[in-house]
Amino acid sequence: MNPSFPSKSFMYVVLIFCFLGATRLYASDPYLTLDYYASSCPTVFDIVRKEMECAVLSDPRNAAMIVRLHFHDCFVQGCDGSVLLDDTITLKGEKNAATNIHSLKGLGIVDKIKNIVESECPGIVSCADILTIAARDAVILVGGPYWDVPVGRKDSVTANFDLANTNLATPDESLLSIIAKFLYQGLSVTDMVALAEPTPLAWHSVRIS
């Protein structure tokens, strides 16, 4: 098997997560709509799709990295882009939390997409929406199902380092504790299997049973 491609088991559980869990985590806000950017930035979905195609073509693992990045964002304060914020004098970001510092990849992909979107539609599209759309497109590009992505999320101006360490599962945590964290977010044990691998690079170590 070519080591540059994810194992079938890994992609299977990732697809299950995205198909079954996406609407619960990402589409529950009544203020989100499918046509939010129809007038202000009608090309945003095309831009994200094109850049994700390039990213996945260059390395198929980028698909799982973007899904994982989105998952780590949504588990802390909701899907608000807070995981993308850097540390400042007054803000302690989530990137360096113990649960994130060695496991988050794909930040450069999101930055690149954001820069292109900004050149087309300055100050319009949130990073939170870009990451959400990119996660959906990542799944499609590795053979997964399509689903509509309601948009209109606002980017957070705060992050929560402590919640990142509390809400996200750690490799040394008990199974029951990890399951409880996923159930709290409205996700199933199947979703947990898809997302709780210690690193997205551990393609061939995924175990469904």
Image (cartoon, helix red, strand yellow):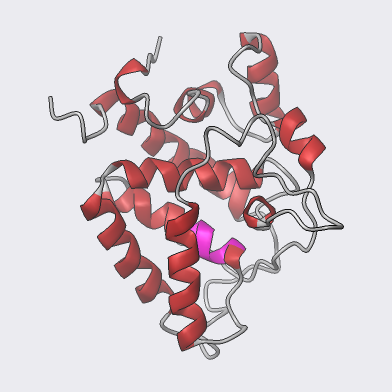
Residue 147, visible in the rendered structure: no
**Main secondary structure found in the magenta portion:** helix
Q: Which residues are magenta?
A: 128-132
Horizontal side of residue 44 vs 32, given as left or right? left
Residue 69 magenta: no
State whether residue 90 appears in this view.
Answer: yes
Number of numbered tags placed on the structure image: 0
Q: Is residue 12 left or right of residue 98?
A: left
Indicate the quadrant containing the N terminus: top left, top right, bottom left or bottom right. Answer: top left
Along the horizontal axis of the image, is 164 left or right of 149? right
Q: Work out whether residue 31 or residue 118 is closer to the camera in this orientation and state it.
A: 118
> In the displayed image of the protein, which residue is found farthest to the bottom?
39
Rendered residue at 64%/30% (across/down): 99
Q: Is residue 125 left or right of residue 109?
A: right
Q: Position of residue 97 (x, y in %)?
A: 70, 36
User: Residue at 80% of width from left, 57% of height from top?
Assistant: 158
Q: Name, please, the residue furthest toward the front.
A: 89
- Quadrant where the C terminus sits is top left
- State whether residue 53 is above or below residue 173: below
